[in-house]
Image: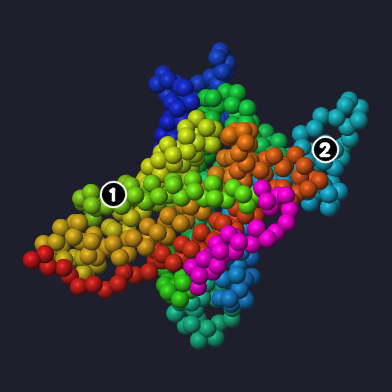
Amino acid sequence: MRAWLLTTAAALFLLLLLGGSFGDVFPLVLGFMPLEKGGQGYLHILLGRATATFFCISVAAILGWSTALALTLLAGFTGKGGLKVVVWAGRFLSVVPPMAWALGLLVVLIQRWGIPAETLFPYAPPEGTDSLFLRAGREVWAWMFPVVTLAIPACAMMLAALAHRLEMLMASEQFCHLKARGLGMVTILHCHFLPSLLLDLVRTGRATLPLLLGFSVPVEHILGFDGLGGFSGQMLSTQEYPKALPAALYLGGWMLLLWFFLMGQVERRAPASRILPTYPEGEARAWICAIGGAVMVLGLLVLPYWMPGEAMAAARSVWWRELWFVFQVVLVAVVVVLISMPLWQGWDRIKPKWNFGLVSPAVNEAVLLPTLLFGALGWLDVPLAAVGAGMVLSLGGMALLRAQARELSTRRMVEASRMLGENTPGILKHHLLRFLLPSLGNWALRMMSALLLWMCIIHWFFSGSGDGGAIPSWGAQMRLASEEVFDDPRGVMVPALLVALWCLSLQLLSRAFRADLPPQESQPVDPR
């Protein structure tokens, strides 16, 4: 319900910014707002497409999640070292732009496997030249190709989460006790760890589904799938019906509501406990990851200048512009969160359900997309777009820190300081900031990683926008090079690789700001 409310609010906000009036609000909510003057209501036009996208993403999620669970269980036999490799491999694959997966699969299927191109796209052959093989191929690939393409990032995101959970379970005392009892690895994984992994799969799937819904827009647009994502991608490219985007976003909220309801029903019947235990990972590993991220950043700053090729030269020439805009957005969000900290009167009485789900990065990105959209179109200049996006993004940071502050307020040192008469700003200063500030740094770097990926997706649809002599951004470079992807796929794959490497390096750097480390012991503060 919270995701539906947020998506509905974002759709109404986008409708007003695109020239709609307050009189269009009720027709949008009720489903009979026409997309063009004198036309039919959008529900009549988009309901069938939304149903196709719903089933496409559902099948892709089931395929990707089941594959991730199987790979995680197999990786468990290799020990914690193999699971570490699987975790970061999944995180790297999950930040590859979905356009690269779609175009890469096209190149492999057509050039390597020799599959006829007319079976992969909507195709109407001349009368009398069609065959049963072509008809069957079109019907199969019309659904299978987008399902497989979306299943890859779904598998990667779930693989990173499940492998990390299994690694923590194998580092716990429970695993040592089970091994001491003489149980084999198959018995431990199947009878003791699998229920926890299944529950974690359901909960992680809630954050995966909004991302897959966003990924479906470029994937369905590239593959010509007649779904809600393909329709939205066409409207983004042509800008023919401005009211179509809010309507599509609103229907996406209903899809999320149905998915989350089904996931909640599965979670209630899960055999494992409803509260998953958390295990400390160790500070040494955090710093190893952070050092690896710093080395990767230095490599990305230096090595591309030594690599030849026209595609690499174009991709490395815009990295500063891409990172600068993302840094501006996150900086605005961090400043707003820091300013709001002393104003948290009564933060210890805030209930987690009042956060409207803003702790989830997936919901943050879904709310942020309309704001970044205007910056990509040039409707707003970059500084104003960065300020607006940062203000929206700060809601997630404030909700995250408030939830953590509420949890820390139950610690004995905080209770003792409160009994001695310390006020809320004093408790924040002397007890909570040493934990909340690293958590804020971790959140900021993770949001920078997510923003880079979504910026690439947005610029894919606006490759023609921008200054006349300016070098196009990474997403625009991929769109322009997609016309010659079968002749030279490097024009698409090089920018996608740089985006994925920058996102991975930022995720590694975020490990230096450990959000799950316990706060340092501190003495109660006597205000006297």
- Say few, some or many: other residues with alpha carbon within 10 Å of mark 1 (under 14 / 14 to 19 / 20 or more): few
In the rendered structure, the answer to whether residue 119 lies left or right of residue 171 reads: right
What residue is rendered at 23% in x and 52% in y?
342
In the displayed image of the protein, which residue is found farthest to the left?
Answer: 528
Q: Which mark is residue 118?
A: 2
Which of the two residues, 72 or 284, is positioned nearer the viewer here?
A: 284
Across and down, in percent, residue 465 comes to 59, 33
Across and down, in percent, residue 41 comes to 54, 21
Q: Name the front one of labels 2 and 1.
A: 1
Tell me the amino acid under the disc marked 1. Ile
135 in magenta: no
- Which quadrant would the N terminus be assigned to in this image? top left
Looking at the rendered structure, the secondary structure element under dot 1 is: helix
Q: Which residues are magenta?
A: 288-314
**On the image, numbered disc 1 is attached to which residue?**
339
Looking at the rendering, which quadrant does residue 505 occupy? bottom right
Residue 310 visible in this rendered orientation of the protein = yes
Scheme of colours in the image: rainbow
- Which quadrant would the C terminus be assigned to in this image? bottom left
Tell me the amino acid under the disc marked 2. Glu
Looking at the rendering, which quadrant does residue 418 occupy? bottom left
Looking at the rendered structure, the secondary structure element under dot 2 is: helix
